[in-house]
Image (cartoon, rainbow, N blue to C red):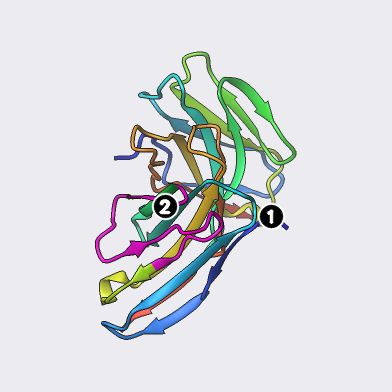
Amino acid sequence: EAQVTQNPRYLITVTGKKLTVTCSQNMNHEYMSWYRQDPGLGLRQIYYSMNVEVTDKGDVPEGYKVSRKEKRNFPLILESPSPNQTSLYFCASSFGVSGANVLTFGAGSRLTVL
Amino acid sequence: LAKTTQPISMDSYEGQEVNITCSHNNIATNDYITWYQQFPSQGPRFIIQGYKTKVTNEVASLFIPADRKSSTLSLPRVSLSDTAVYYCLVGPDSNYQLIWGAGTKLIIKP
C-alpha cells in the first residue's frame, strides 16, 4: 500500500531531551515536507526537501533540523525541545513540486513537551 | 498570507448537496487548484484537483470558471462522515511552498 509512515504517533517528552520523528514513504517521491498544525493556525511548513541531500526552510524552521540521506526517509529532529513545540506534526510527500502534484500525508505525530 | 479565501464554517444535512466556494484572485497561470479533506487528528487527504472548467471524480466535482479566480467544490448527497475541514490550495509559490489557510469546517447534521 502506498503510504507515508510516521513514528512515533504519540510522544510525551521533557524540555531539552533530543528526539527524532521518523518519516518514510514507499512511493519513490522526490519531494518531502514537514508541517506542524496548531489550533487556529492551520498547517505551517517547517522544512521541505526537493530530493536527496537537498533541504530548505519552510515558514517555521526554528528549533528543528532535518536530513535527507535517502530518498524514502526524511526525519525531523528536535535537538532541544521546548514547550512551544508541543504540536501535531505531519510528514507529506509528492512526486514533485509543480502545482499538479498531490501531497500524500502521514497519519500524524502528536508531540507534547513538558 | 494564504492565497485563498474560504468560508470558515458551513452546516448542512445528510443527503444534501454541499458547495464550498474558494476565492483565489491572484492565481498564477501555472497554478492548479487542489482540495484536501481533513478529519480530526488525521493528515489531510486529497479530494480533487483541476486547472480549468469542470472536473469530476467518484467523491466530488470541482467547478472552475473561465477567469479561474474562484472555484467551487461540490459534494453530492453528503453523509455524517463528510463532517471534516476542507482546504482549498493553489500553487505552489515561487519558494515551492503551499500556503494552507484555515479551511472550511463542514458540519453535516442528521
* Residue beneath disc 1: A2
Q: Is mark 2 on a helix, strand or loop?
A: loop
* Residue beneath disc 2: A53
Which of the pair B82/A44 is nearer the observer?
A44
Residue mark closest to the camera, 2 vs 1: 2
Residue at x 40% of width, y 24% of height:
B27
* Subunit under mark 1: A
* Up-down relation of residue B85 to residue A9 (above or below): above
Which of the pair A23/B4 is nearer the observer?
A23
Q: Is residue A105 magenta?
A: no
Q: Give the range drawn in magenta.
A: A51-76
> Do dots 2 and 1 share one subunit?
yes
Name the quadrant containing residue A26. Answer: bottom right
**What percent of the width, then of the height, locates residue B81?**
66, 56
Specify the label residue B15 is tagged with: none
Q: In this view, does B57 lie to the left or right of A31?
A: right
Residues at marks 2 and 1, CA–CA distance in whole angstroms: 23 Å
Q: Which mark sits nearer the N-terminus, 2 or 1?
A: 1
* Subunit under mark 2: A
